[in-house]
Amino acid sequence: MPELPSMCHDDHFRPSEYTAALLRQLWTRPPCTGRVLELGTGSGVVLTALAQAGAREVVGVDIENDAVQRTRELLQSLGLSSASVLQGDLWDPVGTQPFDLIVFNPPQLPVQGDAPPSPRLRSWSDGGPQGRRVLDRFLEGLPLRLTREGRALITHSSFLDADRTRVHLDRCGLQAQVCQTVTVLMPPCKLEVLPPGWADHHEGRGLRRLGPYLFSDFDVLEIRHAAAG
């Protein structure tokens, strides 16, 4: 059995508040016993929670090889050998397979191309110039991979423009409701990789500054087919 590293502040796999919010949703609702998928497994804790809940089939995907390995080690350490973890970009590793529950914490920050090195892996934060590149690709591919009565749980930062997301969902035949809103402190390591003036531009639109501290709001959204009601 692999020995997992202890949790510490310089561990870039340390679960975030976004991960914790998704876990809360999984732990406070009836477990999904069908086919479940997590995109962006990272530390592996969400996929592990899904596997522990008794889903019939559990699949995880991450673009980073180290994240895939960490997730596999966590699952193995807990004796959850039935879950599979695949390396690849977003939907590519699963094709058009349908799932009853899909969970995703997408990267949502407009990380600069020449940003200095960060303690966190770049793919975990970099959402493209407007922060929506991965989110929009996820939404476009979601209808095909979500069963008729299926649900998706995702995190969605307030600065990403909720109206634009609703328009995108409508176009894809999907609808969403807010399950939970969380306020988090944005650490310096995140602020350092953002374009100059980005925080000032979004202040009051999901961002709030108190002295030297900047706080950000995000929602946990439950997404389903609009035809499912």
Image (cartoon, helix red, strand yellow):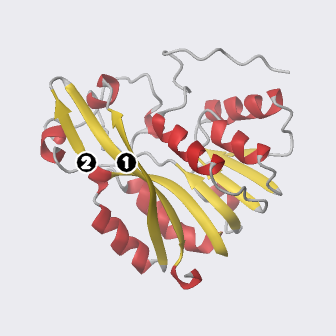
Q: Is residue 188 left or right of residue 170?
A: left
The quadrant of the picture occupied by the N terminus is: top right
Residue 47: x and y, percent? 68, 43
In the foreground, 216 or 147: 216
Q: Position of residue 49 (x, y in %)?
A: 70, 42
Proximity of marks 2 and 1: CB atoms separated by less than 8 Å: yes
Residue 34's label in the rendered image is: none
Q: Is residue 121 above or below residue 84?
A: above
The structure residue drawn at horizontal position 31% and vertical position 62%, both measured from the top left corner, is: 162
Which residue is pictured at 60% across the width and 66% down the height? Answer: 151
Depth check: 179 or 154 in front?
179
Q: Amino acid at mark 1?
A: Phe
Q: Nearer the viewer, residue 213 or 1?
A: 213
Q: CA distance from mark 2 to mark 1?
A: 8 Å
Task: Looking at this view, name the residue that lies furthest to the front.
Answer: 28
Which comes sooner in the sequence, label 2 or label 1?
A: 2
Callout 1: 10 Å neighbours few (<14), some, many (20+)? many
Q: Quadrant of residue 160?
A: bottom left
Residue 218's disc is: 1
Q: Quadrant of the C terminus?
A: bottom right
Instruction: Name above or below for residue 80 compared with residue 88.
Output: above
With respect to residue 117, does 138 lie above or below? below
Q: Which residue is mark 2?
A: 206
Disc 2 residue type (three-letter)? Gly
The answer to whether residue 171 is left or right of residue 64 is left
On screen, residue 129 versus residue 54, left or right, reads left
Residue 112: which quarter of the image? Answer: top left
Residue appearing at x 36%, y 55% in the figure: 132
* SS type, badge 2: loop
Residue 72: percent from left, percent from top: 75, 34
- Within 10 Å of disc 2 (Cα), the crowding (few <14, some 14-19, many 20+) is some
| Residue 112 visible here | no
